[in-house]
Amino acid sequence: MTLLNGSNGDDELRRNNEKLLKRRADLKAKDITIFGNTLTEIKQHLAKNNYEHARELAGRLKDTTVFAEAIKAFEDKPQTFECELCMGKVDGLSFRRDTLTWIRPHLCDKCEQNEKQNEIDKEKRAFSEFVERNMNTILNSTGVEGILLKASYEGFQKTIVQACKRSVMAKSGLYIWGGVGRGKTWLAVATLKDLIKTTELPKELRNNVRHNIYHFRDYYRFVYVNWLLILIKSTYDADDTQTEQAIIEEYTNIPVLVLDDIGAERPTEWVREKLNMIIYFRNNKGLKTLFTSNFAPAQLQERLDERISSRIIQQCEVLNLGGPDRRIQ
């Protein structure tokens, strides 16, 4: 047996490869001579979207060297189908070489997008209906109780209601002030209701609150300012498991917060510090805050702190509720 070494071996290997390639080329040329008309017929059928006849002809070429040419002809001419909704033409999704078939899409791109949007709209409508049915429970979870559950815009001036609705649609908050009994808290809760109905919560949160309505309080919260300050002070007791920092972080991170009756608390330095901290961080994060108060912003500045009133004015539309005491009408 002769061993091929060095350059002689490489030359012999190259010559053998050249012979093999020539043999294949000759065989393909022969097959093209014999089956060329069949290939042409396949392409003609494909051009007319007659894939059944094209596949039948291609099956005759399966054991020939030109079968790859037939496969390429199918791949180069995606099969067109009718959209199940609009009956428009749509190309096949992908090609299966083993069966020479294109995967049929059910819908064209436009109809598929419309279907997806319809599903999104349907889900939103279902969520809105869920909110409407469970509004009182939702409000309870956020801290609203008693007669306030019935709060609405009814009875308020059109300009006042429009300002509340502007706030609902925008990022800005509200500072509602006026004398005792003018409906400040009532209006704030009516606006909170509006926010709950119209704000598009992330899908994950919508799923969470469906399983447990109590999770609404992770997004919306109503709190009487004096009670919040008492809650913070309670953390100073040795037996309390909560910390001051945890409560302040909780109320600075809630996306929508109603701070009811700010300014009613005794204006100590500690009170100023805690309120300023909460308002400062909420401002920085661009979170919506609704305030009610018996004091105009200028009066709040004198009572509490210039920094507090300045930050409130910066982020809120100011509404003054005049008129008689609504509680005794």
Image (cartoon, rainbow, N blue to C red):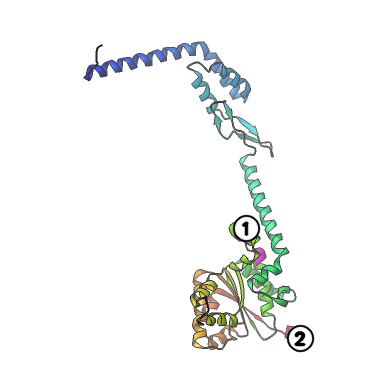
The answer to whether 134 appears left or right of 170 in the picture is right
Q: Between marks 2 and 1, how big is the CA–CA gap? A: 43 Å
Q: Residue at x 56, y 69 (%)?
A: 254
Q: Please give the residue where the numbered disc 2 appears in the rendered image.
A: 328
Q: Position of residue 18 (x, y in %)?
A: 34, 16
Residue that appears at 63% across and 39% down: 108
Q: Is 211 covered by the magenta stretch?
A: no
Q: How many marks?
A: 2
Q: Secondary structure at mark 1?
A: helix
* Front in this rendered view, residue 2 or 53: 2
The quarter of the picture where the N terminus appears is top left
- Work out whether 4 lies above or below 113: above
Q: Nearer the viewer, residue 277 or 165?
A: 277
**Label 1, residues with CA under 10 Å away: few <14, some 14-19, many ≥20:** few
- Which stretch appears magenta? 196-201
- The type of residue carrying mark 2 is Ile
Disc 1 designates what residue? 207
Residue at position x 67%, y 68% in the image: 138
Residue 198 visible (yes or no):
yes
Rendering quarter of residue 100: top right
Would you say the residues marked 2 and 1 are in contact, meaning their CB atoms lie under 8 Å apart? no
Compare marks 2 and 1 and give the one earlier in the sequence: 1
Q: Position of residue 198 (x, y in %)?
A: 66, 63
The reply to whether residue 153 is visible in this rendering is no
User: Which residue ends up furthest to the left in the rendered image?
Assistant: 6
Q: Amino acid at mark 1?
A: Asn
Residue sitting farthest toward the front: 239
Furthest-right residue in this view: 329
Give the residue at x 56% y 85%: 300
Q: In the rendering, at what x and y percent does residue 269 appear?
A: 49, 87
